[in-house]
Image (tube, rainbow, N blue to C red):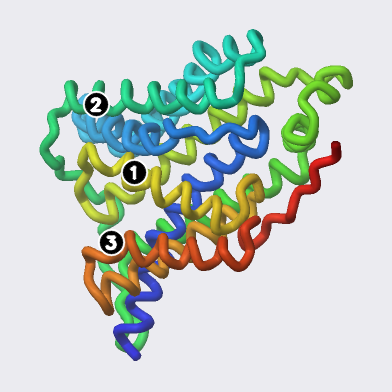
Amino acid sequence: MRVFFQQLINGITIGSTYALVSIGFTMVFGVLELTNFANGSLYMLGAYLSLMLYSATGMNAFLAFFISIILTGGVGYLLDRLALRRLRNKKAPKLTGLITTLGMSMIIDNTIMLAFGSETKPFPNHFDFGRIEIGSVVISWVQIIILATALTLMLILSFVVYKTKIGKAMRCTSQNAEAARLMGISVNRVIAFTFIISGVLACISGNLVGMYYQTVDITMGASIGMKTFASAILGGVGVLPGAMVGGLVVGVIETFAAGYISSGYRDAISFVVLILVLLIKPSGLFGSKQINKV
């Protein structure tokens, strides 16, 4: 029983970071109906920028973290401004945008590899304040901070999307961009804001995971990309609460798979469960079946 609860805590911790990245992914998809393959690369970029700035700022962890968030959000904005907006203006097919994000992802990944090398880098844990024992279950302060950060950001984003003017504009744009434009909504600004939020969430999650495992490497972007895609589909693509739950479920499942079966099967087990859910409910746990009128 002790092992079960310990694995549950570990799964919720890592799952909450998946949920953060998945929220950014599903926000972009909800507004643009675009699968953003560069999301995982922004996650990795945020961690590496923070690591680089940590040394450049004289070991000032919070300043490095803050600057990396701004820079990663800026890269997310540039991804839309310099590439995707031009495609929208030309009314290019959605597949073109998908391929563009894939190309941008490769550019970011290879730039990081050229700048930092391919070897695994140690990442400082700035929240190593010890641990708390509840019975036989051990919870580190890093896990508590990750869970608190993820929960706080999820609540803030839910409020922004469902209770604010910009959130209403995002939901209007997702339903009908042309109608939103005719109603006076600046669709390009809404989309740019969505990409900035996506980059910020990816950066925060990348830093949290780096501190949790105390390492970063150039494969972490591809890994989180698969988990994000699985989490979003599992919860229901375009549904914000679904992205949260999907990320937590994927994190818990893969942690139990690693603990009780083998760490080599953790990714496979997660996707097996995903496939089973989609066979039963193709729209995901929280998604609704779309009706296309002809």
Q: Amino acid at mark 1?
A: Asn
Badge number at residue 129: 3
Q: Quadrant of residue 189?
A: top right
Distance Cα–Cα, label 1 vs label 2: 15 Å
Q: Earlier in the sequence, mark 1 or mark 3?
A: 3
Secondary structure of the residue carrying numbered label 1:
helix
Q: Name the residue furthest front.
A: 294
Q: Residues within 10 Å of mark 3 (few under 14, many from 20)?
A: few
Q: Nearer the viewer, mark 1 or mark 2?
A: 2
The residue lying toward the viewer, choosing from 13 and 34, is 34
| Left or right of 191 in this view: 43 | left
- Height in image: 154 above or below 174? below
**Residue displayed at 36% across by 67% down:** 269
Say what secondary structure mark 3 lies in.
Answer: loop
Which amino acid, mark 3?
Answer: Phe
Q: CA distance from mark 1 to mark 3?
A: 17 Å
Q: Which mark, residue 207?
A: 1
Instruction: Name the quadrant containing residue 32.
Output: top right
Contact between marks 2 and 3 (CB within 8 A): the answer is no
Question: Which quadrant of the rendered structure holds the N terminus?
Answer: bottom left
**Residue name at image x 44 percent, y 53 percent:** 18
Which callout, 2 or 3, points at the residue further toward the start of the chain? 2
Q: Is residue 152 visible from the viewing direction of this image?
A: no
Of residue 257 and residue 188, the one placed in the foreground of this image is 257
Q: Where's residue 13, x and y in %?
A: 40, 63
Whether residue 119 can be seen here: yes
* In the depicted structure, whether residue 177 falls above or below residue 175: above
Mark identifier at residue 112? 2
Q: Residues within 10 Å of mark 2 (few under 14, many from 20)?
A: some
Q: Disc 1 or disc 3, which is closer to the eye?
A: 1
Marker disc for residue 57: none
Q: x%, y% of residue 268? A: 33, 62
